[in-house]
Image (cartoon, rainbow, N blue to C red):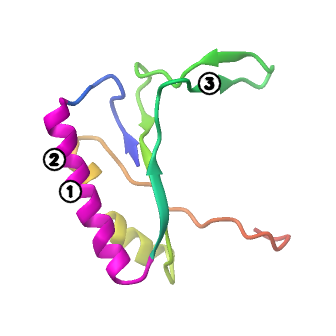
Amino acid sequence: MRHEDGSKIASPEQMQVWMKQTMDWIGGIAAQNKFVSGTGLMFADAKVVSHNKVVTDGPFGEIKETIGGFIVVKAESAEEAAEFAKNCPVLGGEGNTMEVRRIAKNDGTH
């Protein structure tokens, strides 16, 4: 789940609305026995480690895009997973996106 503008902070009331919508969305996927796991990602105590091994506080809300969370689903194809993603409440935010990827298997080919 990608948020276009990480500097926007929602009110506690708006967060409650979004959380309910998200839980309902996940519940619909779970009802199909397709939900595996997922969680939001916190900003507090986050670190960014650069290629030169420099560690800085982050992620930075002022960057254009932030990752707010993820879910793992059991899908027969990327298309099926994208159909789940189309209904994610995060997409109600202008510029927000959902990224769909397969999880690498530990089979030497990932």
When asked about the image quadrant of residue 80, the answer is bottom left
1 and 3 marks in contact (CB < 8 Å): no
In this view of the protein, which residue sits in the foreground, 66 or 69? 69
- Residue occupying image coordinates x 55% and y 23%: 45
Type of amino acid at the residue the image marks with label 3: Lys
Residue 64 image point, x, y percent: 41, 27
Query: Against 6, is 15 above or below?
Result: below
Along the polypeptide, which appears first: circle 1 or circle 3?
Answer: 1
Specify which label sits upstream in the sequence, 2 or 3: 2
Q: Secondary structure at mark 3?
A: strand
- Confirm whether the magenta stretch covers residue 18: yes
Rendered residue at 18%/29% (across/down): 11
Task: Label 2, secondary structure: give it.
Answer: helix
Amino acid type, callout 2: Val
Residue at the disc numbered 3? 47
Q: Quadrant of the C terminus?
A: bottom right
Magenta stretch in the rendered image = 11-34
Classify mark 1: residues with Cα within 10 Å, few (<14), some (14-19) or many (20+): some
Q: Residue 38 or 97: which is nearer the viewer?
A: 38
The circle on residue 74 is none
Q: Is residue 91 above or below residue 54?
A: below
The disc label shown at residue 21, or none:
1
Q: Residue 93 appears at what percent x and percent y?
A: 22, 43
